[in-house]
Image: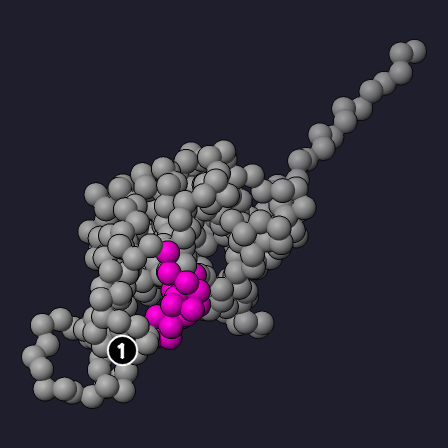
Amino acid sequence: MDRSSEIADFLRSRRARISPDQAGLGNDGRTRRVPGLRRDEVARLAGMSTEYYTRLEQGRAGTPSPEVVEALARALRLDAAEREHFADLLARPTPTRRTPTGPQRVRPGLYLLLQTLEHVPAFIIGRRTDILAANRLACEVLTDFDALPATQRNLARFYLLDPDARDRVGDWEQIAAETVAMLRLEAGRHPHDRRLSDLVGELTLRSPEFSTWWNDHRVLRRTHGTKHYHHPVVGDLHFAYECLQAPGDTDQTLCVYNPQPETTTTEALQLLSSWTAPQAPTTPTPTPTTNPT
């Protein structure tokens, strides 16, 4: 990504969503040529000169102080994920911010934890929304990630490019747009990630909706919420999901889909679990033998 253009586009998109009334400025009678706040209004709210804010929005102001970043975050009403993204965009590249190039691997202890969650869908998501590991029910409820080539096991690719996803994922448009916002946050954190750039390029070419969502500069860090899926055999499934960041590895997140107790989803998962359970190997019946006389 081009750092200057990303800063400019992000700040423009954030001030465009705030009306003067929302900011407590009222209508000054001047004709508005852009939606939301003007540059001078953002500067006034943040306590800085219009000239400085303009240079900052154009990526020509160097690295602002933490006080300036905080003032802008308040003026533009940035949430926690947006503040993180803004800080990532402003940070100068350093060796410690380089994106790891090797494949991500799930440590044994975290993988064992995933295996214990055999009665609910659960998976481990890594950089770029890559699916690093998934249990049987996650593969049954979403898609069989284990059957895909390793380079294709990606949540954004599934939601946006798999034809079955639109039928399988309830509220598909909302979920797909939120996943794009997750990728935006990743792109700010790892601006030189070549595999992420390749993924964005592929989604731009193949998904009709991707560019619109990508260009609105929304960012999101998944934490918890609700999900609705439609399984072709057992029907509608409703979950409360929790995403837990792995201790010691900020690039790996355990996502667990829990149904409410004693619901049709609980019953459906029990059916899916029994249908997909690996069959125990049968022990062949020994052939009777006779002792020679």
Q: Crowdedness of circle 1 by 10 Å Cα count: few (<14), some, many (20+)?
A: some
The residue wearing badge 1 is: 44
Q: Quadrant of the N terminus?
A: top left
> Residue 221 sits in which quadrant?
bottom left
Q: Residue at x 41, y 59 (%)?
A: 87
Q: Residue furthest left?
A: 31
> Residue 30 sits in which quadrant?
bottom left
Magenta highlight range:
63-85
Where residue 245 appears, as percent x and y from the top left, is 56, 56
Q: Residue at x 50, y 43 (%)?
A: 96
* Magenta-drawn stretch contains 282: no
Q: Residue at x 58, y 49 (%)?
A: 249
Instruction: Name the foreground residue: 149 vs 260.
Output: 149
The answer to whether any part of residue 161 appears in the image is no
As helix, strand or loop, the secondary structure at mark 1 comes to helix
Where residue 26 appears, as percent x and y from the top left, is 20, 88
In this view, 286 is above or below 155: above
Q: Residue at x 58, y 72 (%)?
A: 261
Instruction: Name the foreground residue: 156 vs 100.
Output: 100
